Amino acid sequence: MNEFLNKVILDNPVQDYLILIGVLLFVFIIKRYISKGLATILFRLVRHWSPQIEEKDFISLLLRPLEYFFLLITFMLTIDRFTFPQVLNVHVYNKATLHDVTNTLLSLALSMSIIWIMLRLIDFIALVLEKKADLTEDKTDNQFIIFFRDFFKAIIFIMGAIAFIRILFGPGLVEKIIAGLGIGAAALALAAKESIENLIGSFIIFFDKPFRVGDNVKVDSWQGTVEKIGLRSTRIRTLEKTFVTVPNKKMVDSILDNLSLRTQQRVALKLELGTDTPAGTLLLFLQDVRQMLNNNPNILENPVVNLNDFTKDTYVIQIIFNTYIIDGTQYNALRETVNLGVIKLMEARELKLPTTSTTVTLSDLRAE
């Protein structure tokens, strides 16, 4: 038995292979329990930040990354006692050998595992902050959290890319890239000009708060509800229920009308009556309309009702009033009420709208 265990295969005794397989199988079996236990300990350390977070939510975020991390660490620590077989240590590319390639792949796998854990931690922090933000009526906090969650994830990805480059090509290439960026900074800044402007625009939106998620806005020819404010653009659900993506730079630089911040709505109507209407009847009709508007509790005081203009065919009456009603359905109902009221008053005074008539004269032309 000892002879078999000490038998050397590929420069390593069979005993070491069995130990490696046994350790990996053992860790593979218990990795879920170890990861769950570590995640539980971490949760108890941070649960006072947000009592609303359940333990299962935290564990579900970290369980898989920790499992792969423990399995990878175990494999790297166990394989470290092995001697790489010389028969397999062939040149793969340039001066790199197969041993160098395997070491590089292990380093990349370890880096990816660490990045995965960091991304999940960012998700957890965002989840904690979202639970707290849900306690407030302002939905801007929720979008603010999503924005910075994506922002910090982008930073982690950039750091991961730099780490990968360093592992694959060595620190010298990273320094050369940084030096090259210094030389070509002007070209890079010019190429990324729009993206940088949109990123700056997103910060301006969050800190200046010209609008928030859920606001009804009008920018240029687009009007709709803001559904998301991202790193580069703002998403708007239009009145036609289409999904418009507007660059943040345009949202900041353009004249933007935040309709949700209106305190009142203004209604302006024009009514035309025929010139055959007696002046006395017209005066009484104007008084009737003023009284009707003043009696409506949804209309503010001092509405404007006057004879604004007249032509050879019509008298033009102007009706202007303000209301606190902002909701579209209630606003349309108010306008309908006012319009029907005006029609009833016209019927009571026997007034009619002017009609367009065409007179055709026929003449009998006889040849002499």
Image (cartoon, rainbow, N blue to C red):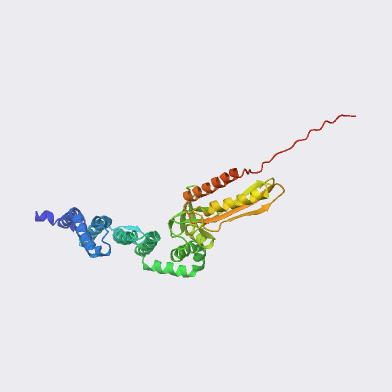
Foreground pick, 85 / 60: 60
Residue that lies at the very extreme toward the top in this rendered image: 367
Can residue 185 be seen at all in this image of the molecule? yes
Foreground pick, 201 / 354: 354
Q: Place residue 62 in its image quadrant.
A: bottom left
Rendered view: 305 above or below 44: above
Foreground pick, 311 / 106: 311
Q: Residue at x 23, y 63 (%)?
A: 42
- Image quarter of the C terminus: top right
**Residue 156 percent coordinates (x, y):** 36, 63
Q: Residue at x 49, y 69 (%)?
A: 183
Foreground pick, 98 / 109: 109
64 vs 137, left or right, is left
Residue that lies at the very extreme toward the right in this rendered image: 368
**Residue 298 percent coordinates (x, y):** 49, 54
**Residue 114 percent coordinates (x, y):** 29, 61
